[in-house]
Amino acid sequence: MISVEGLKVEFGIKPLFDGASFVINDKDRIALVGKNGAGKSTMLKILCGKQKPTAGTVSVPNDTKVGYLPQVMILQDDTTVREEAQKAFADNTRMKERLDQMNQELAERTDYESESYMQLIEKYTTEHERYMMMGAENYEAEIERTLTGLGFERSDFERPTSEFSGGWRMRIELAKILLQKPDVLLLDEPTNHLDIESIQWLEQFLSQSSSAVVLVSHDRAFINNVSNRTLEISCGKVIDYKVKYDEYVVLRKERREQQLRAYENQQKEVAEMKAFIERFRYQATKAVQVQQKVKQLEKIVPIEIDEIDNSAMHLKFPPCLRSGDYPVICDEVRKDYGAHTVFDHVSLTIKRGEKVAFVGKNGEGKSTLVKCIMGEIPYTGNLKVGHNIQIGYFAQNQAQLLDENLTVFQTIDYVAKGEIRLKINDILGAFMFGGEESDKKVKVLSGGERSRLAMIRLLLEPVNLLILDEPTNHLDMPSKDVLKEAIKAFDGTAIIVSHDREFLDGLVTKVYEFGGGKVREHLGGIYDFLQSKKITELNELGREDSQRGNNNFPAREQKVPNVGTKTAQQEVPQETLTKVLSYAERKEQQKRVNRAQKAVKQSEEKIEKMELRLKELDELLMQPENASDMTLVTEYTTIKRDLDEEVERWEKASEELESLTQ
């Protein structure tokens, strides 16, 4: 479909990549991987024709439609969401106009037997069949399905795009590209502005799409679920692996180990030849053998080893001042924007040293609660920030707030104070901005490099409460891993707003779920949270709630019986039975009542024991030394699941007992 031959791109003296050759075939789903600055975004721009290579060719057939989503684009503000999405069907609209024009011409003409009239009929028939095959009559349904999948509500469709944040407007652009149904999709960081539910919807869409896909993403789970082929840009080379990302990681390691062994054997052989030549160079009796060794040595082709980019972000948060035991306490916090309630009755307590995640659909209030904690916006209720709290805040658009006309060094020097100014070069070097890199202007940095630069600013002062709002956007996978380890080693408290499942896994010990105007606490990691909800994907949350008949989060305690009441011990009045039943019937009825009473009592006893154990586990998990004890977390989630099932049994037994005693 697209053929790339001998591609070379130069920025300055060193080529970004050289000699790149590969073919993009139908239904290929290619993950384009490499470190930040390796040239992934540049490769996508060349493939879609927005940038010219230094050398080489890119061949795209004339009838191939290419859709390209860049990391950053200029968006218009003069249309509604629906009108903007309808632009994806501009070709359909023009085709409909042509069909209407031909139809009118056919109705007005009377030369039915002429050759031109027959040609017009044939052309109209062909165009109309093509129009119907494109599904042009159903495009409104496609628009609604795609926009809804990307997180929009139907009430949003008629809103002006100017009312939406940059992230939501990028979703509109993504929707337009998907609706165009291009033959090749080029997606540069499509998940950066999506929540987990929308990412999972996009995964399914791309997996089922007939289009070829080339995508750049730092969401490991996303690219692994979508890809069936991996192109790696590393150290100026493009290497093609015909497997998905997880398998590529294994194959890459095996390939380099084989190359290394072959290289070592070759070096050993070369050393032996050189030693023989040096030893017998001046002996006439060995002259023929020496010449043979020299010729053999000249014919040896050195084995090349794939270079490994060992540069990584060496991130360590400085020691922090000890804070109070409870950095954040919310009690009945509520936030309204006009008539719209973002959330209410929010009561939560975050203890010192905890690492917690805020998850949920975009627009459910995660960043809003963060702003409340920061004191940036008003709210109702009680929100207390603990004693000696020093907050370090990394916002979603932190990288976009950098001055593009400053250099990397100037950016840090501008905000650094005191003795820290003497260590700027050391800090920049640790973040892969050493040497000449520190003289680069911010405007030429890639998205990942800007994120790293913004992260440096966060490290200039010691803090004991980290609030990170989508910190992994634009970070490559090695950098994400290092950031994750640094947060785990951080001796303060961390609140992480993120849609990245792999990043959150093993990092957080508590999840706060935002949705339906409520905030619900779940102990355990992100996958424990999914398991506790008895779902495999977060986009099933809304479906689960609607099946329960409400939009709020179902509370486990909603129908837990009041253990110790007389419900299980009550006797059925004998006169009630006597009035309507014979003796035999009364006897059988009483047996059934006794069985129901026994079942209710047994359930209440089990529930009481499980509630007591959950309370004990709550207290244990609140202790910092037990925060990462997965044995306790697993026990908690198991008991919680068993408790939910026991409550259902208690409900059925109670309903049966009630029907028998009426």
Image (spheres, rainbow, N blue to C red):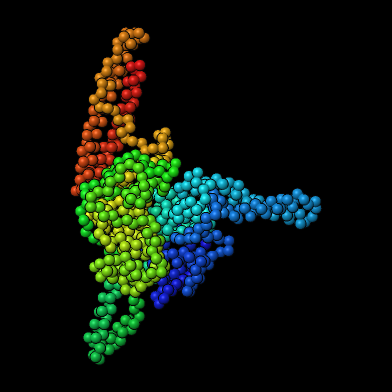
User: x and y percent of residue 600 in the render?
Assistant: 28, 24
Whether residue 369 is visible, yes or no, is yes
User: x and y percent of residue 383 in the render?
Assistant: 30, 45
Residue at 45% over, 55% down: 166
Q: Is residue 623 left or right of residue 381?
A: left
User: x and y percent of residue 603 in the render?
Assistant: 27, 27
Image: 122 above or below 569: below
**Residue 481 sits in which quadrant?**
bottom left
User: x and y percent of residue 211 in the render?
Assistant: 50, 55
Image: 621 above or below 119: above
Nearer the observer, 382 or 495: 382
Image: 522 above or below 454: above
Residue at 33% over, 70% down: 409
Q: Is residue 242 left or right of residue 413?
A: right
- Viewport quadrant of the C terminus: top left
Image: 175 above or below 438: above
Residue at 25% over, 70% down: 422
Residue at 30% over, 12% down: 573
